[in-house]
Image: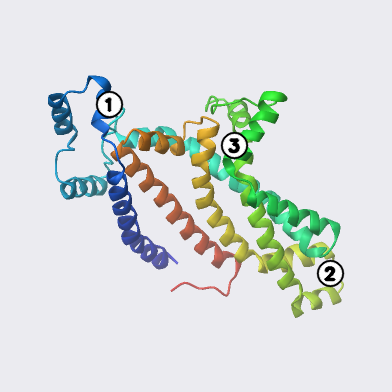
Amino acid sequence: MLQYIARRLIQTIPTVLLVTTFVFLIIHLVPGDPVEMILGDYATPDSIVAMRGALGLDRPLGTQYVSFLTGLIHGDLGTSIRTQRPVMAEIRQRFPYSMMLAFGAVAVSTVLGVPVGVLSATRPGSWQDTISMVGALIGVSMPTFWLGLMLLFLFAMKLSWFPVIGAGDIGNIPDTLQHLVLPVLAIGLSGMALTARMTRSTMLEVLGQDYIRTARSKGLAKTIVIYKHALRNAAIPVVTVVGMNIGHLLGGAVLAETVFARPGLGKMVVDAILARDYPMVQGAVFIIAMVFILVNLLVDVTYAALDPRIHYN
């Protein structure tokens, strides 16, 4: 297993290199000059030339890319053009907010989605099955930004149950959780719908297997048959969807953090793109890509824990 993990980590190097190259080229092709945006109406040709030299933007694109990769190898993601702070320091400050949001949404989507899928699979064609699948279809179809605005309007503005915007005091757990509820629901409901649909389809297939009929014929309790025998064998596709949900929810966090004005990586990336802050965009996308790669690795390792027949060489 350790050899497999080490091999997978080595295999991530080309993926990370490809992602960073693509993002580097795309962000430099976006129209607009960050120097002119910083200097604004007071920009003069001499001041623009001087600042471009100070920021290293006057160098050839290839030289800038090599410099970025060199810094990346040494753990240096560069300095933000907009804030003049190290990119790693900015990411370290905002990273906890995004992780709380993404993994909170994954927890909600899993805790709610798996039971809903099991309920639908054990009662196919019933009213519970119909309501669950219609609800799942609605959850998949609703855009994150629209759902976030509706949740804000109803629960924050009309009912005043939750704060309107912000992330609260990270050192105050109740305040942090109160600010987390609405954005987690905004991006977690779509993940819940995907998890429920996958759980239902996989459970329907497993419940028709011979060993399930044998377990029932032995007189085992229904809950034992469903949750010990059926659900565990149906868990691998569900775990795959949960792992994919993390990447999907990290993308959804960009919209949720913008709607709810949370100081996370998503909002930071949006602000950096608008300001043409090249180092900030490159650094944030690199970190998000690494999280997604590590989550995929964790999903593969979880397969072996769920199914002893799976071995990695």
- Comparing 159 with 307, the one in front is 159
Which residue bears the numbered disc 2? 220
Q: Residue 173's mark?
A: none
Q: Give percent across and percent down for residue 94.
A: 43, 34
Which labelled disc corresponds to residue 38?
Answer: 1
User: Distance from label 2 to label 3 (Cα)?
Assistant: 42 Å
Residue 145 shows up from this direction: yes
User: x, y percentage for residue 242?
Assistant: 58, 56
The secondary element bearing badge 2 is classed as loop
Mark 3, secondary structure of its residue:
helix
Between 109 and 130, the residue placed more toward the observer is: 130
Q: In which quarter of the image is residue 209?
A: bottom right
- Which residue sits at x=31%, y=27%? 83
Left or right: 184 in relation to 88: right
| Residue position marked by numbered label 3 in the rendering | 183
| Nearer to me, 177 or 248 | 248
Q: Nearer the viewer, mark 2 or mark 1?
A: 1
Q: In this view, does 97 lie above or below 248?
A: above
Query: Does 113 appear above or below 77?
Result: below
The amino acid type, in three-letter code, at marker 1 is Ile
Describe residue 123's horizontal placement relative to residue 296 as left or right.
right
Name the residue rendered at 52%, 39% in the picture. Answer: 255
Query: Gap in Å between the C-alphas at discs 2 and 1?
Result: 70 Å
Q: Which amino acid does label 3 sit on?
A: Pro
Residue 76 rendering spot, x and y as whole percentages: 26, 41
